[in-house]
Image (cartoon, grey):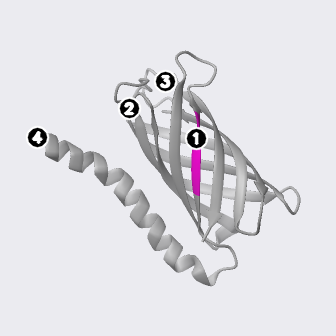
Amino acid sequence: MIRRLMRKRAIGPALVVGVLLLCAATASAQNRRPAIQLSGGVFNVGKTPTQAEAGVELRAPIRLWRLDFAGGVAATEEGSYWGYLGLRRDFDASPRLVVALGLAVAGYEQGDGKDLGGSVQFRSSIDFGYRTTDRTRLGLTVHHLSNAGLEEFNPGSNSVLLTYSIDF
């Protein structure tokens, strides 16, 4: 029984990674490159209790409107975790400064952490990045995770994360 549950819970993040790797392989002919982003920071900002959060995101460019497929996995110190898949777009504020907006659908597992009212969540984000080189970026991400009213209970959660991105 436990093995079956572990396999089912691993399907979502494995599917996200597989789709993104496929997209990354097809994006190599474009001018923009796929990227990986590592993040760490605070989950449930502005509410108690706050928790540490860490995550990884993969991005692959698509041809339509300069959008990127974005997907990843994240977890909190209390055992909550989620996998998400969506779209994002970078906007160049200057040659070195980038602002990105993102929207994704997420599968959430509460663990011993915060009850967000259901397993289907939506993740909206804004990233502020500084290009340190042509292929790396340091940044700050703020994201909101919520079930968007699909469930009667919808407390939502905000996160503030430091990020490091690498194009490959």
Please name which of the two marks, 3 or 2, marks the residue nearer to the observer. 2
Marks 3/2: CA–CA distance: 19 Å
Which numbered marker is on residue 40?
1
The image position of residue 22, as x and y in percent, is 45, 72
Q: Secondary structure at mark 2?
A: loop
Marks 4/1: CA–CA distance: 33 Å
Identify the image quadrant of residue 160. top right
Residue drawn where x is 57% and y is 77% of the image: 27
Identify the image quadrant of residue 157. top right
Q: Secondary structure at mark 1?
A: strand
Which residue is outermost to the right?
A: 94
Across the whole image, how many numbered discs are drawn on residues? 4
Residue annotated with mark 4: 1
Amino acid carrying mark 1 in the image: Gly
Amino acid carrying mark 2 in the image: Gly
Q: Which residues are magenta?
A: 37-41
Residue annotated with mark 3: 154
Earlier-in-chain disc, 3 versus 4: 4
Residue drawn where x is 65% and y is 70% of the image: 64
Please name which of the two marks, 4 or 1, marks the residue nearer to the observer. 1
